[in-house]
Structures are given as structure tokens and as C-alpha cells.
Amino acid sequence: MEGLKYSKSQFYRDINFLKKLGFCIENDNSGNFSLNKELSDNYDLLSHYYKHLAMSYLCESATQLNKDFLKFIVFEKNSTFHNFPLFNVVFNAICSKNKIEFKHTSYYFPDKVAMYELSPYLLKEYKNRWYVVGETNKGFRTFGLDRLSDVTVLDKTVSSKFEKAIAMFDYTVGLNFSDHEPCLIKLSFHKSQEPYLKSLPIHYSQKILPIIDGRFELTLFLSYNFELKQELLKYGHFVKVISPKWIKDDFKLELEKALKLYD
């Protein structure tokens, strides 16, 4: 990073630190190091860490150029992080393998407040909100931190099921677990959407086939859920579901319901 004082010994300490975290750092024995994303266990963590580190350095250096530097950087207006102390409470409970108890307020029914006891396994960010993923007596659940109150860490230890919880997201877009088994979903897109979908894939399983007659086929291996449905519907007439038929039929029904609003 330009202007950053960095000793060789510090560099190698950081390389070893990253390797311990699970990052695959390769050395060609000529002084060149590279990160192998495919073999790194925690690549997403590293990319987020670097993004925040780079932004921190940018802001620090910008103060020397213009005291009003912040007006030149435009963040999302909903880019906020509520309840940071609550994030720490839940995170510490996860690390110490303790159950938590809290009140949860429903978005759809604001007057409905329910008490839950949860074995928390991980924190997950989705669309600029943080969620805790864990297990209640009725199975795995996901709760938005912004809807929790009166959180208490209980003196009840649990066996972490982190691996199982994270695996449930392997074939999931968003947060809602689906009862549907993962399946191959084939879609047809207008060629104008190809650059966008290549730069922002719907899911890591995404594969794009060559353009034929102005359209291209895109495949996904996923569990069909509400978030995936919403994600695809935003493409409007640019996308068509090819298979499986039951997802195609569900899309047709959704579009028919939408059209009826304009009768």
C-alpha cells in the first residue's frame, strides 16, 4: 500500500498469521507471494478485512488533503450498523458456546413479541443487516439483530454445530432455509444481462453458457427459496425459467398475480 511503512519481518509475521487463519498463501521462491482463493478457507473474511482496512487508510490519508474529504465518498443511505454492543454480546456467546435468550419482534406483526432460547452458531451479514444463526427447540432459525431485545447470555453451554449451520447456506441464497433439496436450475437471460451477472454472480455455483440468438443459458445448483425467487424476479422480462418445471410454474403464477394488479 502506497506510503505505508512495512518491515520485512512484519510482512512475514502477517503471512504466517494469515496461513494460521486458513488462507492459502503461495510463494514461488523468488519473492513473489499470491493468494489462492480456491484453497483458502476464509477468503471472504480476508476480502472484507482488506476492504475495511483500505477504507480506513484512505480516510486517514485524506484528512491531510482536504478536511471535508467525507463529502466526496457516498455510502449507501441505509449503510448503518445498529446495536454494535448487541453484536458483541452475541459474538461472545458464540465463542464461549453459551445459549442466549431474547425477545424477538416480528417485522410483519410488530405487536407480536416472542421469547426465544437459542444455541447460537454464527453471525451472518445479508443486505447490510446482521443475523444470528442458531438452533431453537424447533430446529435451525435465523434472527435479525435489529429485531432482538433483552438479550441474556445463559449459563448453559452447547456443542457448536457451526459446520452444519454453515453447510446449510452452501446451497442457499439469502437467509431462509428451504425444505426443497438443492437442484439444477436452468435459466435463459437476454444477452444484455451477461456483464452484470458475470461481475455479480447470483451464487458461486453459477455457470454461464455462450450466447445464442441473443440469449444465454445460466445454471445454478441451489435450494429454491423466497430470496432466490425475489432475486430472479427483479430481472423482469430479461429472464425466463427453463427448468425444473415446478419452479417455472411457480414463476408463471407469481407473474399472473402481478398482472392482475393492473387490470
Image (tube, grey):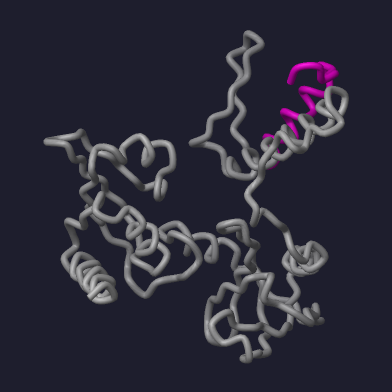
Indicate yes or no whether the magenta region holds residue 10.
yes
- Choose between 100 and 208: the one closer to the eye: 208
Name the residue at the left extreme: 213
Residue at position x 22%, y 37% in the image: 209
- Choose between 69 and 55: the one closer to the eye: 69
29 lies above or below 107: above
Is residue 74 found left or right of 175 in the rendered image?
right
Residue at position x 76%, y 30% in the image: 58
Residue at position x 81%, y 27% in the image: 62
- The stretch of residues the image draws in magenta is 1-21
Indicate yes or no whether the magenta region holds residue 163.
no
Residue at position x 20%, y 33% in the image: 210
Is residue 4 found left or right of 28 in the rendered image?
right
- Choose between 168 and 261: the one closer to the eye: 261
User: In which quadrant of the rendered image does the N terminus lie?
Assistant: top right
Give the dominant element type of the magenta stretch: helix, strand or loop. Answer: helix
Residue 134: x and y, percent?
61, 73
User: In which quadrant of the rendered image does the C terminus lie?
Assistant: bottom left
241 lies above or below 196: below
Residue 96: x and y, percent?
78, 67
Residue 117: x and y, percent?
68, 85
Quadrant in the rendering for residue 241:
bottom left
